[in-house]
Amino acid sequence: MNDTILIVEDEPKIARLIADYLSKSGYASDHIDHGNAVMEWLAEQTPMLVLLDLMLPGTDGLTLCRQIRERYPALPVIMLTARVEEVDRLLGLELGADDYICKPFSPREVVARVKAVLRRTHGAAAGAESELSEEERLVLDEDGWRALAGGHDLGLTAVEFQLLKVMMQSPGRIFSRDQLMDHMYRDHRIVSERTVDSHVKKLRRKIADIWPERDIIRSVYGVGYKYQPEE
């Protein structure tokens, strides 16, 4: 991973303005103005975050967001859109965007949103947990397929461990039930949304047995679930 923010925007003036403001805030950036070039660029290097315009020549932003989520699930994506009616899809997390910004926008707003998403994603879980005492830390032992809450083994099933792992990799990001479903079983079996809800309910109950006051697996009504280690 490099320290670059990828700007995917076909309007040169907007792209230059965003790049200038990112530079003033200490971020390097690269610019792509055609949708067909994005996945090839990402195959060669991994940016910190992608600012992705919805309307692009070639492959459109919705398709690109879906492709990025499939190939690079931990890569943060902020959508730029003038189509407010698409917001529910962008964050409805049918597509899995981490945030969206409606045009016209202030470049300062873009920088603020970038900083907020990076705080939630890049190192957010590690940073939050490192500030906690041993009794407050949630740690994944991937070799042993265990999750330890304050040093106590939660006794998770393989499915529960997978769900927790996926959400902890992107703290603050809301995952739809379909997205979580994709990670639950290695054989990619088809299960219902109620099955996902059932596994999450059991996972939350096991965490609550150790930490009754900490609500770190949040339900987002009508959308899905997220891991929120702190406010």
Image: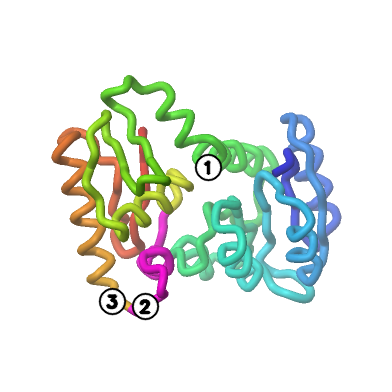
Mark number, residue 167? none
- Label drawn at residue 189: 2
Residue 125 x, y percent position in the rendering = 45, 36
Kind of element beneath mark 1: helix
Q: Nearer the viewer, mark 2 or mark 1?
A: 2
Which mark, by number, is residue 121?
A: 1
| In the rendered image, the vertical position of residue 113 relative to residue 97, given as above or below | above
Residue identifier under label 3 = 192
Image coordinates of residue 51 in percent, x first then y, are 68, 53
Label 2 SS: loop
Where, quadrant-wise, is the C terminus in this rendering?
A: top left
- Based on the picture, tell me whether residue 31 belongs to the magenta stretch: no
Residue 9's place in the image compared with 108, above or below, is below
Q: Quadrant of residue 1?
A: top right
Quick one: SS at disc 3? loop
User: Residue extending furthest bottom?
Assistant: 190
Amino acid type for the residue under numbered disc 1: Thr
Q: Earlier in the sequence, mark 3 or mark 1?
A: 1
| Distance of label 2 from label 1 (alpha carbons) | 29 Å
Residue 175 inside the magenta-drawn segment = yes
Task: Judge from the rendering whether residue 122 lies leftward or rightward of residue 176; answer left or right.
Answer: right
Mark 3–mark 2 Cα distance, whole angstroms, equals 10 Å
Distance from Cα at disc 3 to Cα at disc 1: 28 Å
- x 55%, y 58%: residue: 73
Give the residues drawn in magenta, as a range.
Answer: 174-190
**Which residue is found at the position 52% from the left and 53% from the top?**
98
50 horizontally vs 179: left or right: right
Question: For mark 1, does the 10 Å Cα neighbourhood hold few (<14), some (14 to 19), or many (20 or more) residues?
Answer: many
- The amino acid type, in three-letter code, at marker 2 is Arg
**Amino acid type assigned to the residue bearing label 3 in the image:** Ser
Residue 8 lies, in percent from the top left, at 75, 58
